[in-house]
């Protein structure tokens, strides 16, 4: 049975803390990039972004207030075409911005997997820094498992909460008129499969106990430090 390697464990814990922060910020930057491309002004926070759609929202509310009865009854009114166009655009843009974060996370994970495959073909008997980088990038997919687990646990602990699902995945399902758990479960299952492949196929067996032990400590520590301590100070 392979023992935990203390020196390696320290390095891995530090790496997990760092990649927890990197993963969180890069995810939010994915949202931000899409929002900026759509012409919105944006603000980055430690675990979220804001994008300003107040102009179109104000116009929608203005038209709604003016033609409230006609809209509710589904009959024609003078600004119907503008109202529907603004509403459709805001909804489609909301979908694109919501997609930005998960797409960034999943694409980064895919790059990690491709790097691991390339490194194994290049030198199957060697595991170097590039392999470690591939492991950490591929495990960006852990975010999908984490989100699904946290949202389900929150529902179990607080039955009054609206759903077992949450985050970007819930909004994407909403925008696409899908069942609320479809996107979260789909990405969560893929994330689980990829994570198991990375750990039990591409990670050498002698490193696995140390890696799993360090991941539990480093991932939890990184999340706590960034979400509750450091993040709110740097990017409130």
Image (spheres, helix red, strand yellow):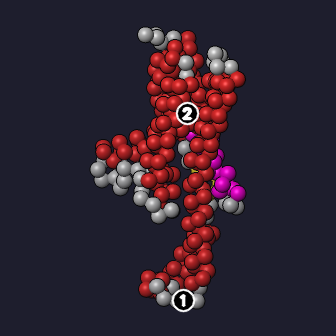
Residue 140 vertical placement versus 43 (above, below): above
Q: Quadrant of residue 14?
A: top right
Which residue is disc 1 drawn over?
77
Residue at image coords 57%, 78%? 84
Give x and y (percent) for residue 113. 61, 33
Question: Image quadrant for the N terminus?
Answer: top left
Q: Earlier in the sequence, mark 1 or mark 2?
A: 1
Give x and y (percent) for residue 149. 40, 40
The span shown in magenta is 24-37
Q: Nearer the viewer, residue 86 or 54?
A: 86
Q: Is residue 230 visible?
A: no
Q: Rounded to the nearest whole Å, what is the CA distance between mark 1 and mark 2?
A: 52 Å
Residue 51 vertical placement versus 130 (above, below): below
Give x and y (percent) for residue 40. 67, 60
Q: Quadrant of residue 89?
A: bottom right
Which residue is disc 2 drawn over?
139
SS under mark 2: helix
Magenta-colored segment: predominant secondary structure: helix
């Amino acid at each position: 049975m392979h023992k935990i390697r203390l020196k390696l464990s320290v390095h891995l814990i530090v790496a997990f803390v760092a990649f927890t922060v990197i993963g969180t910020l890069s995810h939010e930057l994915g949202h931000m990039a899409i929002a900026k491309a759509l012409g919105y002004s944006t603000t980055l926070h430690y675990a979220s972004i804001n994008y300003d759609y107040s102009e179109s929202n104000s116009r929608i509310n203005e038209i709604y207030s003016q033609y409230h009865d006609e809209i509710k009854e589904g009959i024609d009114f003078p600004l119907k075409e503008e109202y529907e166009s603004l509403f459709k655009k805001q909804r489609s843009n909301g979908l694109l911005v919501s997609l930005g974060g998960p797409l960034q996370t999943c694409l980064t994970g895919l790059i990690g997997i491709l790097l691991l495959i390339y490194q194994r073909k290049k030198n199957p008997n060697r595991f170097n820094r590039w392999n470690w980088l591939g492991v950490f990038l591929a495990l960006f997919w852990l975010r999908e498992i984490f989100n699904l687990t946290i949202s389900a646990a929150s529902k179990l602990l607080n039955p009054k909460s609206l759903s077992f699902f949450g985050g970007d995945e819930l909004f994407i399902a909403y925008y696409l008129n899908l069942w609320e758990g479809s996107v979260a479960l789909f990405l969560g299952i893929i994330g689980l499969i990829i994570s198991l492949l990375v750990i039990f196929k591409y990670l050498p067996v002698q490193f696995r106990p140390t890696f799993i032990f360090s991941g539990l400590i480093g991932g939890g520590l990184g999340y706590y430090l960034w979400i509750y301590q450091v993040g709110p100070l740097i990017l409130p």
